[in-house]
Amino acid sequence: MFGKLSWEAIPFHDPIPLITSIVMLLAIAAIAFWVWRKGWWPYLWNEYITSTDHKKIGIMYIVLALVMLVRGFADAIMMRAQQSLAIGASQGFLPPEHYNQIFSAHGTIMIFFVAMPFVIGFMNFVVPLQLGVRDVAFPTMNNVSFWLSASGALLINLSLFLGEFARTGWLGFPPLSEKQFSPGVGVDYYLVALQISGVGTVLTAVNFVTTILKIRAPGMSYLRMPVFCWTALASNLIMLAAFPVLTVALAQLMLDRYLGFHFFTNDGGGNSMLYMNLIWIWGHPEVYILVLPAFGIYSEVAATFSGKPLFGYRSMVFATMVICIVSYCVWLHHFFTMGAGADINAVFGIASMIIGIPTGVKIYNWLFTMYGGRVRFNVPVYYLIGFMLTFVIGGLTGVLLAIPPVDFVVHNSLFLVAHFHQVIIGGVVFALMAGYTYWFPKAFGFTLDERIGKWIFWCWFIGFHLAFMPLYVLGFWGGTRRLQHISDPSWAPWLHVAFLGAAIIGLGIVLTVVQLLYSIRTRDQRRDVTGDPWDGRTLEWLTLSPPPHYNFAVLPDVHGEEAYWTRKQTAIKQDQLIQEPDYQPIEMPVNTPTGVIVAFFAAVCGFAIIWYIWWLAILGLIGAFAIFVWYAWRDENEHIIPVEEVRANARERRRIRMEHLHKLSQST
Amino acid sequence: MTTEAATIGLTHGGSEDTGLGHRGPESKSIVVPYGFWLFVLSDMILFSALFASYATLVHATDGGPTTNQLFDRNLVAIETVALLVSSFVCGLAMITAKRANMMWTQAWLVLTGLFGAVFLFIELYEFAKMIGEGAGPQRSAFLSAFFTLVGCHGAHVTAGLLWLGTMMAQIWSKGFKQHILRRLLCFSIFWHALDIIWVAIFTIVYLIGTLP
């Protein structure tokens, strides 16, 4: 009846997961109760959970990412603590089977459920606004995508409380991840959670490629799109082409585990190196899925806070698209040691070095954007400069790793761990924090506290370098990754410094919460009344903060690059806005619970597959199909916002803007 | 560059030649099939990974049966014809749907489904026969790859049939509305794309596999 599920699945004898899950369950219950007491459930249901508004969906993605960041960081600090304790005679506090689950969960969560939803959240929130349109191409599908990602995250967290998580590393390499060596449900949790969220990601990619290529404001030609839109386009093209390969690799591993196939097994002619190839054909482009939008954020920040157009816009676009393509031609550098031969290794080594060239172009473009500009040192600029310092070192260690003979020496060492954390924290996380500060006022109508924001930056910057520079050294000394116990006592000081660094990053995460609460409390002093708190250059700053559901009363007519900047400067110069347009009623998509219900059934089905409860799995599938058919039968697709409402809102916006621009016009 | 922007010198420079796509948002009749095409392309990449796996493992027979001992060209020829005819009939259904002819549209769609079902039936028969002979997917890596590649196509056809049934019911109850026609167009894109993949399977798996 319940497959493999029994009372033994709950970790009664393991205090760490047991206490953590009890605390988590209590926290969720407390929040749910608090929301109920405040009477906010209907608001949440109508305004967020069932919303098809790209801005609301973007915010939900980012909330998901921040919550999962806490979980992923808890894993990280436990690993650092274990490694700085379990030296020589001491065994630390984590037994090997638990430690292995923690590093697997850390990688899986940080990539799939922190970095991905964070980046997708920004694309959701920003891209339609920057393109000057009212929504993405498929608003309902957007909601479905989000809830599928959330289902995946739910299953990953459930593994803490019921059963176990994979002990195979974040990519689940066979033959270790095969049934023979990992008989438990851990790998199944991993596989099913990623398959469900992977479907959501492919749908997101379809949605955004269509949006960027087909839905833009009049006059917004390709070479007038802001760089963030270009990087979002490149990132989504990669998602569209890379995620199906991940789906195949994981599906084949599932077939091996569930039905006794022989794709990657040691017997029956299976070939585990096939899995390595497939997973990295997805895995390397995945790096660029994350880092390209990050580059987009830096581009926006550099131009805005330097008060200058982005230096070398066209070369930036070109570099982005070159990276988009070359990202597919480097995957083998993850396993030079496979022994594919000198020729193949040389080709992939050279390709890996070539991809550094467009990235270098970008670094110079940001530098020259700042050069000669009147740079305002707000929090996002701190991250921009911190990124350039950190990322260049990470890129250089990457070029070292791209040389096959060097890679043979440091393969799977702590040197590698330091390298990819340097590019992902220094490249992606810094950008996410910059974007969070930069677009927060657009989303909520007030800015985040600058002073605490700078403390957070210093925590990340100093903490990162303390945590990972020692790992480079240890990697050179032969330290391999994923060690549960360290036998050489001379490593102790380096590992203690690394722990200190992780603790400082932890302080930064705590301060992020403090900053949010403090900024909410003092929001009346930090209101963004004009909709343009940073003197921005792209169209999202044209509308009010927070923007109305329909974003723009009339789609802006775009002339030239930097659509909004041009318009703003013209208005300041002439001391008047453009002539009031003829307002029309606006059609907007209606909200729908389809996404959350489909995701519920997907989660039920996934849970049933993990625990071999086949009747429930079939029930889940039927439920998901039934809700789709029910949705397909709808007649009401859109609701009309009456012209009076549009006109009243637009006039109010024009009055506010006129006041603001008049002030600027007087001051110049 | 507009004159006002030029006079205050605030653009990047560059010409007024703006490249493609400056007409504003496209209509739904463009956007929906375009998005669906992207999904189909992504599906093709899924199949390309399955093809690559098959090509890697085709000789990994672990002492078990090889392609030449298993495949029957004649049976697969009939199977292929059934699928191609199904696609052709689907095209006819599209033509009649554009003319809003309910009876013929439904008739052609029924035929589309029937030919699809014939294809699926032959495939299942082939699978059952192979498993009966001890050449199931658990036998060797080659057979794992074979069953996954061909079975994944079969799963797509099954999903297509489910979709087809739903579409027929929808056309029957709602008539030829714009959004229903768009969905029918997407279905037909899907159905034809499955043909393209089948032609590749036919060539790479069955034809090359039965070379002497």
Image (cartoon, coloured by chain):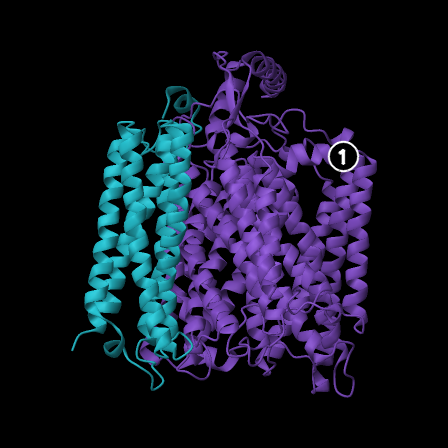
Chain colours: A purple, B cyan
A103 and A486: which is toward the camera? A103
Q: How far across and down, in percent of the image, does residue A600 sit?
A: 62, 49
Q: How far across and down, in percent of the image, does residue B80 sit?
A: 23, 58
Residue drawn where x is 76% and y is 34% of the image: A40
Q: What chain does mark 1 sit on? A: A
Horizontal side of residue A299 vs A456, given as left or right: left
Q: Residue A278 occupies which quadrant of the picture?
A: bottom left
The amino acid pointed to by label 1 is: Trp
Residue tagged by mark 1?
Answer: A40
A436 and A468: which is toward the camera? A436
Residue drawn where x is 79% and y is 66% of the image: A18
Task: Answer whether residue A530 is visible to the viewer in this image.
Answer: yes
Residue drawn where x is 62% and y is 59% of the image: A607
Residue drawn where x is 33% and y is 87% of the image: B63
| Above or below: residue A312 compared with residue A482 | above
| Above or below: residue A614 compared with residue A654 | below
